[in-house]
Image (spheres, helix red, strand yellow):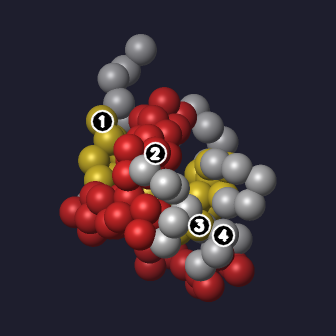
Amino acid sequence: MEKIKIVYLPKVENYLFDLVLVLFNKDYFSYIENAEEYKDKIIDFIEENIANFPSKKTPIELQNIGTNYIFYKSNSRTTWYVFFEYKKSNYLITHIINNHCEEAKWL
């Protein structure tokens, strides 16, 4: 089996780092460690599923953020959309949004 390589654009890495602080500061989580764990679950999902989870073609209105995407339902209220480009076994994570974002109306 061919080994896959996953690379995150710096803006995605920054977004995930900032997500922890936003979740904690807006009291979605009482402890920063819990917010960190939530973020880690998103990353774990990506790392474990990007190569075999059925991906979808991104609607034309959002193709500037990535031509393919997968989704992760973290709870009953929130779904995360992970946009990416790939060639052979190389995946470039280009953008992440959740269903609460305006952009998600196209998905």
Is 69 positioned to the left or the right of 87 in the image? right
User: Rounded to the nearest whole Å, what is the CA distance between mark 3 and mark 2?
Assistant: 18 Å
Q: Is residue 51 visible?
A: no
Residue 9 is situated, as x and y percent measured from the top left of the image, at 27, 60
- Callout in the foreground (1, 4): 4
- Callout in the foreground (4, 2): 2
Look at the numbered discs 4 and 2 and tell me whether their residues touch, using CB distance below 8 Å: no
The answer to which of marks 3 and 1 sits earlier in the sequence is: 1
Position of the C terminus, as image quadrant, is bottom right
Residue 10 is situated, as x and y percent measured from the top left of the image, at 22, 63
User: Rounded to the nearest whole Å, what is the CA distance between mark 2 and mark 1?
Assistant: 28 Å
Look at the numbered discs 3 and 4 and tell me whether their residues touch, using CB distance below 8 Å: yes
Looking at the picture, tell me which residue is in the foreground, 27 or 79: 27
The answer to which of marks 4 and 2 sits earlier in the sequence is: 2
Q: Secondary structure at mark 4?
A: loop
| Residue placed under numbered mark 2 in the picture | 34
| Residue placed under numbered mark 4 in the picture | 99
User: Rounded to the nearest whole Å, what is the CA distance between mark 4 and mark 2?
Assistant: 21 Å
| Residue placed under numbered mark 1 in the picture | 5
Going by the numbered disc 3, the residue's amino acid type is Asn
Residue 25 is situated, as x and y percent measured from the top left of the image, at 41, 69
Going by the numbered disc 2, the residue's amino acid type is Asn
Q: Sort mark 4 into few (<14), some (14-19) or many (20+) by Cα contacts within 10 Å.
A: some
Q: Residue at x 64, y 75 (%)?
A: 100
Q: Secondary structure at mark 3?
A: strand
Look at the numbered discs 3 and 1 and tell me whether their residues touch, using CB distance below 8 Å: no
| Residue placed under numbered mark 3 in the picture | 98
Look at the numbered discs 1 and 4 and tell me whether their residues touch, using CB distance below 8 Å: no
Looking at the picture, tell me which residue is in the foreground, 14 or 57: 14
Going by the numbered disc 4, the residue's amino acid type is Asn
User: Rounded to the nearest whole Å, what is the CA distance between mark 3 and mark 1?
Assistant: 24 Å
